[in-house]
Amino acid sequence: MLQVRKLERYKDDQGNEIVYDGEVREEKIDIRFKGANNKLVISPEADIKDLLVIFTGDNGQIDIDRTTKRRAGLRFELRCGHESRIRIGENVGCAGRTFISAVEGVSVTIGADVMFAKNIEVRGDDTHPIFDVRSGKRANPSQSIVVGEHVWIAKHAVVMGGATIGDGSVIGFRSIVTKAIPNNCVAVGAPAKVVKRNIAWERPEVVTRRPGEEYPRKGEKSEQYWNLTEDDGATEAKPVVRSQPRKRRAAQYLPAPVRRLARKLRSS
C-alpha cells in the first residue's frame, strides 16, 4: 500500500495520481493507494478540512469540485474500489466527516450545494456479501447512488445503494434512504418515505433569529431550487389502516362433529 500524507500533485510508478494545483495541505490528509491506475482530482479551490481517501482496487477515480461560497468545509472518508467513481459537486459542505463508498464498478454522485450534517454514510455497498441459500446467488450487489443538487441530509442518515434523491429535498434525522426520493420533499424513517411535498429549504440558521422574524431574508432565497415536487405521490407515506378481525359466530366454537350434525339437520 502506498500512503500520501500531503495534498499536492503526485504520481507513482503504479499509475496512481493526484491532480491538485492548490495550496499544499498536510493537516488531516491521508490518501492510500492499494491498487494501480487510480486518480484523485481535486479543484485548487476546494475547501478541504479533513480528507481520508482509500483506493482499494484499480482504475478508480474521485473528483472533488470547488468551494466558492461560504460552507462548513469538506470532511470526507472516501472508499473507491475497482473501476468505480465518486463525484462531489461544487459548494458541498460537511458539518462532520461523511463516509462515501463506491466499489465493484459502481458510482456515487453528489450534486452541487449539498449540505451534509454529522455522521452521514453514503454507501453503494454493504461491505460484505449476502447470499440466497437456495440459489447461491448474491442478494446484495453493489449499486450506484445519485444525490441531486441542494439536498440537505440530516444527522446519522444513511443513503444506500440504488437510491436517488431529487434536487431540493431534505432527508430527516436517522433516516435510511433505499430507493428513489423525488425533488423538493421531506423524507424520513427507515426506510425513508416522503412525508411532505412541495417544500424548499435555505441554509441560514434559525438559532440567532428573533421570534416572528420573516423568512427568508433578502438575498437568502435560492430561486432555482423553489420547485414543485414532480412525481405522482407513489412514494408518499400513507397511514397504516389495519382491518378489524372478523367476529366468529358462536356455532364456530362447537366441536367439529356437532357442527357437522347441525349442518345435516338444517339440510334435511
Image (cartoon, rainbow, N blue to C red):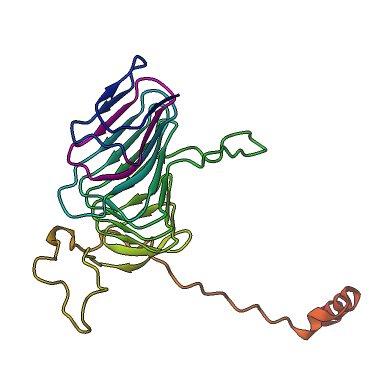
**Residue at image point 35% right, 44% down:** 76
Up the image or down, 243 lies above or below 178; here it is below
Q: Position of residue 178 (x, y in %)?
A: 44, 52
**Residue at image point 31% right, 42% down:** 109
Image side of residue 56 versus residue 24, left or right: right
Image side of residue 226 versus residue 181, left or right: left
Which residue is outermost to the left? 218
Image side of residue 222 versus residue 242, left or right: left
Q: Position of residue 196 (x, y in %)?
A: 33, 69
Of the 4 image quadrants, the one containing the N terminus is: top left
Q: Position of residue 129 (x, y in %)?
A: 57, 37
**Residue at image point 44% right, 29% down:** 56
Q: Quadrant of residue 155?
A: bottom left
Q: How many marks?
A: 0
Q: Position of residue 260 (x, y in %)?
A: 86, 75
Bounds of the magenta segment: 27-50
Is residue 41 a member of the stretch shown in magenta? Answer: yes
Using the image as rendered, state which of residue 175 and residue 119 is in the foreground: 119
Of the 4 image quadrants, the one containing the C terminus is: bottom right
